[in-house]
Amino acid sequence: MKLLALEARQNATYYRSRYEQVRAYGADLYVLNGVGTPDFWPADRYRVVGSQNIEDLITEAKQWHEQERFEGIITFSESAVTAVAAVAEALGLPGVGVEAARTSRNKLLMREAHRAHDAPHPDFRFVTELSEALGAAAEFGYPVILKPTLGAASNFVFKIDDSAEMEELFPRALDGIEGMSWFEMEAHGLDLGPHGLLVESYLDGEEFLIEAVAWDEEVYLGSVVDRITVEGGTFDDDVHHAPTSLTPEQVAAVHRVVTAGVRAQGLRRSVLHAEVRFHRGEPYLLEIAIRPGGGGLDLIAEITAAHNPIRAVMDVARGATPRVRHYRPTGVHVTAMCLLCDAGRIARIDVPAEVSESEKVFFLKITASPGDVVRRPPEGNSILGFLGTTGTSLEDARATMLEYASKITVTFDRDGEAS
């Protein structure tokens, strides 16, 4: 099969490992970046447009398509899903459609769709001024969630406990989202919906992450993962465990909620990453994205539930019936976490062989590099990478993960000060 991968603006080398997975699964993969670095992908299968404008991306993709006849177009980037939908339409390739992609990308439009179609969701309000944010929070009752409409990876997402915190964090978030990388990586010239901040009511239960597929009239929950982080004021310190602790009855309730959200967002055939949180014993939608989850969730799905989100992306992109089943755990336990470090400019990262070569490590990805500036909330949400380990139980896998994470060291320039 011949597939085209697209980013309007290349996210460093973050998705190259996934591109290599696609190629390993038998695809002839071509990569088109609007703005990108040379030598990112083999030269005969790689083009850089030199522009993030959607019309320029479409023009280049059409010309390449005439030569190569792609069967489908894919992305793993939250910032590229709307651009991919637009390019797929222009090339006459399978896709979700621009309207459904925009609704699935913009958190305000997503919430409005959930409300219109009675898909369980938190209360929400789009706010442009501090006074509006304070008013919404007073109405919903503290704590509340403050989040960007076009964010990703928990950038500038805060749990706000009182009006003083809102007064402190709202202006930082409003200013920060203008330079947020996930917004800057969007294609230019597309209607992305409102760019700003939401205040949402707080859901007080546990959170679960689902890798799923919508195919015609059915939604398949391929994988269900527990978020077991001790929650604070930000949502960056992700620790995951699978198989899920949910009962079969609770999984069925999650399936009903995700299906309602899929219908609300106008999705008929799509790979899905859904996030659900329980509130007073019932599941509510946090979001349904139209790409696989990051941070090793694809590997967790395969190990713990025999579901392969990457293969699903490849199948759905070319209109082929995906190889998917309803959730059925394999019995293998894993834990995984985002690797975090202090803020500062990185001079050196050391990963001992005891960690990198361990048979218990199924996923190790260092996404930061020497010279990078790490920014931590409330100034940003940079991460060092990801680590996942296997075990005979949750406790066993988690103990190994925490031990190995402690052995990864970071040295900073200028005594750790960012510049």
Image (cartoon, grey):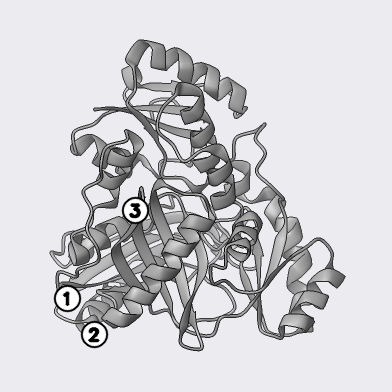
Q: Foreground mark, 3 or 2?
A: 3
Q: Position of residue 67 (x, y in %)?
A: 36, 11
Q: Quadrant of the N terminus?
A: top left
> Can you say whether 152 is above or below 376 in the image?
above
> Can you say whether 384 is above or below 225 in the image?
above
Q: Position of residue 35 (x, y in %)?
A: 54, 29
| Residue plotted at (45% across, 33% down) | 6
| Residue plotted at (40% across, 54% down) | 272
- Real-space Cα distance between discs 3 and 2? 30 Å
Q: Quadrant of the C terminus?
A: bottom right
Residue at the farthest front position: 217
> Which of the two discs, 3 and 2, labels the residue nearer the N terminus?
3
Q: Position of residue 325 (x, y in %)?
A: 22, 58
Query: Which residue has dot 3 on it?
Result: 213
Type of the residue with mark 1: Gly
Foreground: 206 or 119? Answer: 119
Foreground: 370 or 395? Answer: 395
Q: Foreground mark, 1 or 3?
A: 3
> Which of the two discs, 1 and 3, labels the residue nearer the N terminus?
3
Image marks 1 and 3: residues in contact by CB distance under 8 Å: no
Query: Which residue has dot 2 on it?
Result: 395
In the rendered structure, the answer to whether residue 141 lies left or right of residue 25 reads right
- Real-space Cα distance between discs 1 and 3? 28 Å
Q: Secondary structure at mark 2?
A: helix
